[in-house]
Amino acid sequence: MGLDSRELTPAMVQRIVHAASETRSSKRAALVLAYVGGNEVSPSTVQRVTHQVGMELANLRDAGEAPVMAQAPENPPELAVVEADGGRIRTRKPGQGRGVHGEAWRETKNANLLRMTHRTFAEDPEPELPRAFTDPKRVAKLAEKEAPPETLALPASPPREKAWRPERLVRTCLSSMAEADVFGQQMKRETNRRRFPEASARAFVGDGLPWNWSVWKHYFPEFVPILDFIHALSYLYAAALAMHAEFSVAWSCYLRMARATWQGRGTEAMDELNRWLTPHGLDDHAKLEENDPRKPIVDAARYLRNNRSRMDYPRYRQRGLPVTSALMESLVKEVNLRVKGTEMFWNDPQGAEAILQVRAAALCDDDRLPRYLSTRPGCAFVRRSTVTFAA
């Protein structure tokens, strides 16, 4: 009958894992299963089954057997885009009894592997700074700053053609507690399976995290490296606010630097930052305290210097490549929706790794989670005494 040692049919396991992957906790998943599906399952059973399946996915990944879960595409993509970013997850030490012991924040590694539409152009298809980046309230939100103290009237501008921007066709998601080099290997294996090296156009988009560019250098050097423009914009906005006390002056300064950077003249933005730093006896190597009001200016100058080789935005647009990692930011939020929350702790490392595998598989567009669950052989779920695996 397909029953395992805990008398769960394969269909029941599928329901449990899908519910656990999409809800905020095992308790919520158990409620959904009861009230929507009419299946009485305890939260501890949801935890146990989800952990088992998550570790199976991790083991298949590490053994290079992910094709069991996802079929390789028939054709390579026209445009293959690799994006990576870090997240945060709270963990605890296992085997310490009930409650939270050894609480810690740990970084997760996340990757967004995108098959996208592609067009190239004879010249830059959008040379002017987009309207979204000239709206004070929108920019403040993107830079994670408080809304500006005043509202500036924006000049009217006609709608602009946006068809140059590549659109997502198929998304493959990876997430892990692994160190950067190991995660880079996971990314490389998956992109090979998705035939990314065969794409006619390839891009690697990331923010300024050093591990992003270490992964790019070692595993994706044939991909065009692109610094996410929104991260550059955020640094410039924070620096402008620190350079000028009056908001209208700061806003004009920000617009000047943002337009220059968007148009591939990042050295002009760097020069403006350095013109402020030099008379104050500073440069982008200065070490300042976190609460020093001049720190955002030093940070912005350093950020642009470190990433200047990845900021040729007009050329990227002309080649039909993305210039922001908005899709990556969205993916991190989708992962965090399941793994990050108040009073949510995961056993380190297996509990955290297991839920990340289930959540990432659920967020893939290639149906790898339902495909795996529908073909997975029956697996005995053994009660793990009183140790819990997830929040």
Image (cartoon, grey):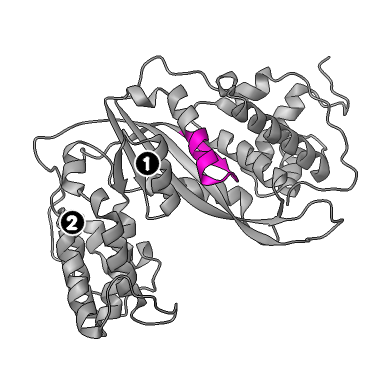
Residue 227 drawn above or below residue 283: above
Residue appearing at x 68%, y 38% in the figure: 19
Counting every numbered tag in the picture gives 2
Q: In the rendered view of the protein, which quadrant contains the N terminus?
A: top right
**Residue position marked by numbered label 2 in the rendering:** 129
Is 203 colored magenta in this rendering?
no
- In what element is the residue under mark 1? helix
Q: Earlier in the sequence, mark 2 or mark 1?
A: 2
Q: CA distance from mark 2 to mark 1?
A: 30 Å
| Quarter holding residue 2 | top right
Residue sticking out furthest to the right:
385
- Identify which amino acid the numbered label 1 is placed on: Lys
Residue appearing at x 14%, y 57% in the figure: 265
Residue 196 drawn above or below residue 334: above
Residue 234, position as x, y percentages in the image: 33, 64
Which contiguous range is marked in magenta? 172-187
| Quarter holding residue 222 | top left
**Residue position marked by numbered label 1 in the rendering:** 217
Query: Mark 2, mark 1: which one is toward the viewer?
Result: 1
Residue appearing at x 17%, y 71% in the figure: 272
Within 10 Å of disc 2 (Cα), the crowding (few <14, some 14-19, many 20+) is some
**Image mark for residue 373:** none
- 156 with respect to 214 (left or right): left
Residue 327, position as x, y percentages in the image: 40, 44
